[in-house]
Image (spheres, rainbow, N blue to C red):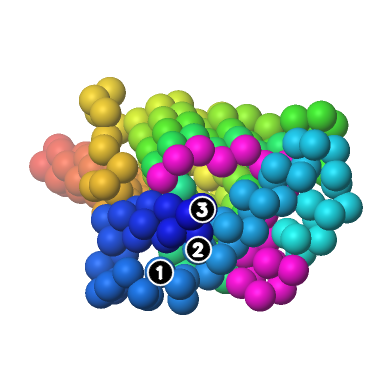
Amino acid sequence: MGFFKDWQEEYEIIKERDPAIKNKWEVLLYPHFKAMRAYRRAHKLYLKGKYFRARLISQRAARKTGIEIHPGATIGKGFFIDHGAGVVIGETAVIGNNVTLYQCVTLGGTGKESGKRHPTLEDNVMVSVGAKVLGSFTIGANSKIGAGSVVLSEVPPNSTVVGVPGRVVKRDNERVPWIDLNQVDLPDPVMNELMHIEKENEDLRRELDNMREKIDDGK
């Protein structure tokens, strides 16, 4: 009964976020589906203190799927890993509801903390391809982490982060629904800064030209 319930629930999650899926049978081919079934078994064992058996299950799943989820991690409802290869989720990571991760994402530690070492992702967060979130801080609800970003500090809700190290680009204070999140329409603060500098240079050149004209007129 548990298998068919998981199958149905995962199909509902996947079909909302991955247009490539055509029918329920394909769910069985998704690494995410296999990894999450293994995680659920391993997590129950971990909570009972059966750490070796829990890690045995999670490591077998990692070898088969390319997705490494520590059995100690806490994961909410509606979680989805698209593609999945190279995803790593640490022991003390906490993931809220309706969170989406893409391939090669790491929710890891810095090696300098003890106890809670891994990030907390609140509801409706999306982490794009290759992003690394390292440390025991919180990514606020409805936030997006851009592809390839390295996030090392707190992110407020309804924010977008891009770059290395990650820089927060504030969004409107209104809620950003997770279903509208994507990996493409992200602001580029570095490019914005370069454009700002270029504009300042143009203004300075204009002022210099005006000064030269005044000096020439005075002669």
The residue that appears at 31% across and 42% down in the rendered structure is: 178
Crowd tier of the residue under label 3, counting other residues whose Cα lies within 10 Å: few below 14, some 14–19, many 20 or above: few
**Front-lying residue, 12 or 16:** 12
> Horizontal placement of 86 versus 128: left or right?
right
In the image, residue 35 lies at what x, y percent?
A: 59, 62
> Horizontal placement of 44 versus 32: left or right?
right
Query: Looking at the image, which residue sits at the far top?
Result: 173
Q: Quadrant of residue 152?
A: top right
Please tell me which of labels 2 and 1 falls first in the chain.
Answer: 1
**Front-lying residue, 21 or 176:** 21
**Amino acid found under the numbered disc labelled 3:** Gly
Q: Which residue is mark 1?
A: 27
Q: CA distance from mark 2 to mark 1?
A: 7 Å
> Horizontal placement of 1 versus 35: left or right?
left
Q: Which residue is mark 2?
A: 33
Q: Quadrant of residue 91?
A: top right
**Amino acid found under the numbered disc labelled 1:** Val
In the image, residue 130 lies at what x, y percent?
A: 54, 62
User: Are circles 2 and 1 on residues that touch, CB within 8 Å?
Assistant: yes
**What segment carries the magenta color?**
60-78
Residue 40 showing in the rendered view: yes
Crowd tier of the residue under label 2, counting other residues whose Cα lies within 10 Å: few below 14, some 14–19, many 20 or above: many
The residue that appears at 53% across and 70% down in the rendered structure is: 31
**Amino acid found under the numbered disc labelled 2:** Phe
User: Are circles 1 and 3 on residues that touch, CB within 8 Å?
Assistant: no
Q: Secondary structure at mark 1?
A: helix
